[in-house]
Image (tube, coloured by chain):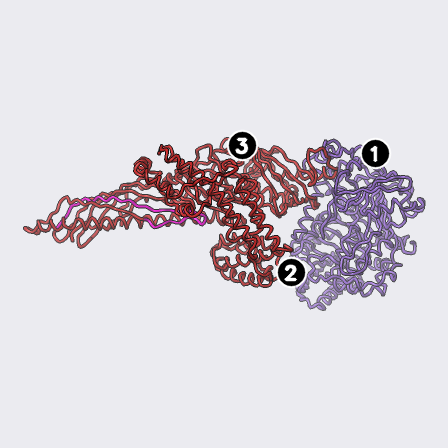
Chain colours: A red, B purple
Amino acid sequence: MINFNGDFLTLRRMCSWSLLLGSLAAAWLLNGSLLHAQNEQNNLPNENTLPDTVVAEAAPTAAELLRVTRADWQRLDSWLQLKPTYYAAWMMLLKQRVLLEQWNRTTGVDPVALQDLEQSFEKYATNFNDSRYDAFLASFKRWKTMAIRENYLQLAANVRRQAYNEPATSENRPEIYRQRIRSAVLEVQNRLTAFTSQGAKDWRRFLLWDTLQELSRGDGPLPLETLQHLQVVLRNGVVVWDIQAMRDLQKAINEAAIQAAIATDEDFPESRKVKLNELASLIASYADNPSNELRISIGPPVAWLKERGELKELAPTILKQFSNPNFRYETSARVIERDVNQNVSETFDVNDIYNGARVSGRGQLVGKVKARLIPSSNQAIWEMRMDGQTLSNTQAYGSGVSVNSSGNTTVSAFKNVIMDASGMRSQPATATANSSITYNGINASSYGSYAGYAQSRVYANRGSSEYQAERSTENFITQRLNLEGSQYVRKYNQKYQDNFVYPRARQLAWPQQFQMHSSNDLIVMDMLDGPPESMGARNPAPPAPFDADAYVKSHVSSFDAYGWRRLAGKTLTVTELRQIMKDLGMEDAADRAEAVVAEPGAESSPENVEPSESVLAQRAARTLSFPLRRPIEFTLENGLLTAQAHLAGFSADGKDYSAMEVKFTYRLSGGENGMEIIRETLEAWPECFVPGAGGRLSGPQLVVRKLLVNVLKDALPEQAKITHLSGGLGDDLPIKYYANLGEWICIGMNVPPAEKETKPATKSPAVVRRPTSEGNE
Amino acid sequence: MFPQRKSWLKGRVLFLAVLAAVQGALCPDVSHAQSLTKLLPANAYWSAETSNLSDFDSAWKKTAGYALYSEPAMKPFWDDLQIKRPGVLPHVWLGLTWQALLDAGAKEVLWSTMPSQDGGKVATILILKPSSGEFANQCQTAFEKYWKERSAAIRSVKVGNANVVEASSPTRKSYFSVAPAGIVLCDKLDALAELIKQQTPQAKNSLADSAEFQTTQKSAPATAQLRWHLNPFDYWEAIHQDGSPQSLKILKRIDFYKQQGFGVIKAMGGGMTFGSSTGEADHSIRIVRAGPLLKGSGLLSLVTANKFSLPDWLPQSVSSITTYHWDVPSAITAYGHVYDDSYGDGNQGVFDETLTDIEEATDGPQAKLRGDVLQRLGPLFVVARDWGGEARPMTGSSTKLKKRRTVWIAPTSDPAKSAQAFEKFYTGDPEFTHEVLTAGAEKVTLWLSADPNVLMLGEKGAEGEERPLTPEIAALCVARGFVLAASDKEYLVSLLKGGVPAAEKSTQLFFSGESKIVSCGRYWRNTMLDAEPVFLRIKSSQLDSDDSLEQQVLYRLLVAKRKDDASWKPVDGGKLPDFAAISQYFGKARGSIYPEADGWSLRLISEYPSAR
């Protein structure tokens, strides 16, 4: 066995990943929910790219595409030799069987299947510089437009067809569902009791156990609101405890919720039909006149139908095609490269008995470990590759023959690491070695006149020795890579679970859609967050205007989503609202002053005085209530973030006040090493009052407005600076850059290099045994 | 805009006074010689003492209150009360019945409470002055008999150097200690240790030595059969120290009052004489103020006068009338402090800003509240109450109960301007409606809100919570030269539309014989009118904590569970007789409040029913 002093894939580099995770978690907090995402949607045609009327022309076929590439293959191949990094991307284009099959079978193509095809084709246009290729590109664009339209029309027809089928649901009998829930609750309890000792002590609280028990024991109709709340709870529960019992409980609750939702409609069959037709019409309209408004309007009917158990097969397709991620986290390839890439130069001792011969000597391994991202649309993949060479000088002695030899083995090893929403996993490593052995001296004098024979036997076995050396080296390197890789993956997943998955799930904030993918340059985590009817961002995440190691891009709709998750249907105290703002990193100067005072030795001044008991009591006694749907809506324009909250009511010091509308704006800008947030306006008015329309508030309304504004001033910091993406969930990353990009904000961070471990000054004196074939037989 | 705080605050003060008085009345009376309060530490919350138990017993037995207690028709109710509320009488709670005390020849007796860290936060205390050598033995025998009958374990324990008898039942403990200075019964061991220490010669800082105690006792007449003393905020805090969320809320509220300067009220106390000229209780109360009124406590600034004439249209059907002369400018300033601290996070000036916004904001009502309303009010304020409203039965019972109604009345120096300001203030708000009434020759605009909390910035106290900071007002108007605000629209309408009773009748009825006396406030109650609705609520088990003082006391006594009373069971109001059978026991009461250099004096007089 070889002992590499200073392992080439040091686990210390996990630190960098934990930093990324920490910032990722924090970024999520910043935006609220982030979520899932499908970057494929970036290619959805919008009003700017689709003509009002689509001209049906003869579309190119898959065969034509292949013909173009084959015709130019030689030139393409030579060009790719110059740009080897593009090779894999190109090959992926040609391997999209789904695309090619759809292409040849039908005129309608799922836009998701097209991926970045058009952009990729265009990328090669200048390199080919061939009119046939240009013609192909033009033809492809026309075909793509038409094919996508046809796809939407087919989808609309499928939805419309559903309206003529029977509802997918069965009879509503609460007692049956209650019985199922009861059984599932018992099973979960049995299973989770074992988890208690494993650190999931708060699972009862997390799962709203009392509510579940109460629900399973009660009688009469099942309360829809409770069921829907539990649906969210269990969706997150399954993320944390992915066990069959939990999935069964989730299923039981889901079925009950569907029935309870149906029960809210007096004439469900008819309203279902209306809703399906409405959805079909919206999709068909979108096919001809794609617009964001239409796209977003598709969300509510889909959500309504899904809530009632309809569109089980079509809903995922529709959401995939019409929703956009509204939060994106990107990590530059160089972060991984910086972590993983390194030169390897190790010496090793050989001292062993092998095939009856004592072998001793020294060797050296020289090589490089490199990481490389591999483009993938469904998950993020990076490859860990090691290229190395071992050189050894050994002396073997046995059966009266001594052999001095030099060994030279080149080895290349690969291991793919895959990341997706479930975490990181690695594929088995593969390695290829090539050995060459040179005998520098064979002393067989003890054989006398047979010495020549003895030498020839040694030479005759060289091929076999080299073969064994190659296999042994391959085995060793793959074992080593697998060992290191598994440790790497385990530690990453631990961090990922602790800092990202569990906190999110516990806060009922696990993204509804969440996808990771990789390109040559970036690892991307796309998410879509929001209520069930949310269709995400209006436009794809724009490229960052600066160069950073990691980027957080958040669409304003993700702010809505955050507001929805934290506020919808809730009554929160000012203390809790302040905590939400703190969770977002928005701690105002006064709060920081409070913190300073709390530190021993801090000087007290009028500006940094701890809040009095009465102020704390007031904060705890004042509450704001938010409606279940659309509690707060944000817009972002030129760095001005405008929020409009629809309060269902508020209470101050024991007195309840009626509903009010609240509007506040924050100016977002990038400052020195951080993001600056300054509150510009804060207004409130009664529900039916139109500000600025010449109307006047009554005295009580004005008093209440003033009171509410005062309460909100206490809850919303006047000025804040976010210097780190933090949330107490992991390591913080300092914000280096900030930019407003239309409806997106973009934050850039540089990931500090992991601290290099210093190698020991002297090598370990350990005697090592190397599986080599050197020596006499 | 924010008037009537005084009424509430006065109510708070009166509540504490009456609470003490009622507790005292329920546990017979006192007079003073060598005060047993020498044996109490200065941090005692509350005390009541009599210097001669048998005199007190005799005087009490001559009153209508005792007649009601002896009324055969009431016996089932009292029996039920005593079974279910052993803690109603502190001496019984500790293990000595009233009769046992009399039989033993008890003379000087003191009831009290003080801080304890043992279990509850309040220890209940009974101290007896030994009247003879046998007295202690007789008391101990009665004590042990009482507890043995209740299957309690009796044993001897040491507290310091003293031998103490401990009676231990499953629900509570009681300790009996004999010392030369006094026999002490107490339900908390740590408090008992304090009390034993207090009996040593080197003991200092007794309650009797405190300046506040001495001041409150000065005002008690020499003939007082019961003397009492109360540390209001400490007592109030102590009885809420059970750690429940509700209590924490109340404690925060108490903190708030203290911050507003109400903590300047250091003590109250006085004495009660029974069977005086009126034949009932004559109660002298002294409230001790430690310093000048600051911040919100400025609301207690009253001014003296001798003119308390009532509006001539006020009907005789009121159950109570309170009149007072209020220093309006001081009150506005004081309320500003309360408002700033309560609604403005302590930012001074929020109240003024709010008023300025109401007067000047371009999108506001531009109503001159200060100039046209607040500064034109008073100085005489009248609070009238009756029981004319109808309330829905709170349970399945079909009994229709009457609801207390209140109207607040203050003259305005310019009714037209005040009315105009209100019109601007409320116009355009969908939460308010208005009606125009003709009251005599006058057209009156009545501003109405379905939610009595909305018309003013009032707050509704939840069950068991302290009462609102500001009153609930459902209707408001300017009429007959007054600003009127009522808790009930119908009440206000009936006042405006009703006939005009003879003015002299009202005035004479309420304050006959006191028209020349200078004071800052007066109170009159038709106990008969007030008693029946409350009685019916108890009888139908629908009593709640209304804002009347007595009702709050009764609510706590009969309904609200005492925190440390594991044997709590609701008292059965159904055991009460028909009200007609006992109505002859209810008389009337009146009172006045006078300013003092360091506080206020109150005199409350109950009239014998025959004087009705």
Where does the image place residue A461, in percent across and percent down from the top left? Answer: 16, 51
Label 2 resides on the chain identified as: B
The answer to which quarter of the image holds residue A410 is top left
On residue B417, which mark appears? 1
Residue at 32%, 37% in the rendered image? A76
Residue A471 is labelled as none
Closer to the observer: label 3 or label 2?
Answer: 3
Left or right, B436 with respect to A218, comes to right
Quadrant assignment for the C terminus of chain B: bottom right
Say which chain tag 3 marks: A
Q: What amino acid type is highlighted by mark number 1?
A: Lys
User: Which residue corresponds to mark 2?
Assistant: B158
x and y percentages locating residue A447 in the rendered image:
8, 52
Q: Which residue is mark 3?
A: A669
Q: Are marks 3 and 2 in contact (CB under 8 Å)?
A: no
Instruction: State whether discs 2 and 1 lie on one chain.
Output: yes
Up the image or down, A435 lies above or below B61; here it is above
Hey, what amino acid is under mark 3?
A: Ser
Residue A412 in the magenta stretch? The answer is yes
Magenta region, residue range: A401-429
> Residue type at mark 2?
Lys
Q: Can you give x and y, in whole percent of width and height, for residue B358 in the image?
A: 74, 34
Left or right position of A288 against A134? right
Q: Is residue B345 visible?
A: no
Q: Nearer the viewer, residue A41 or B287?
A: A41
Give the secondary structure at mark 2: strand
**C-alpha gap between disc 1 and disc 3:** 51 Å
The percent coordinates of residue B349 (x first, y second) are 70, 34
Look at 28% across and 41% down and name the residue there.
Answer: A367
Circle 1: element type? helix
B130 vs B193, left or right, is right
| A370 w.r.t. A167: above or below | above
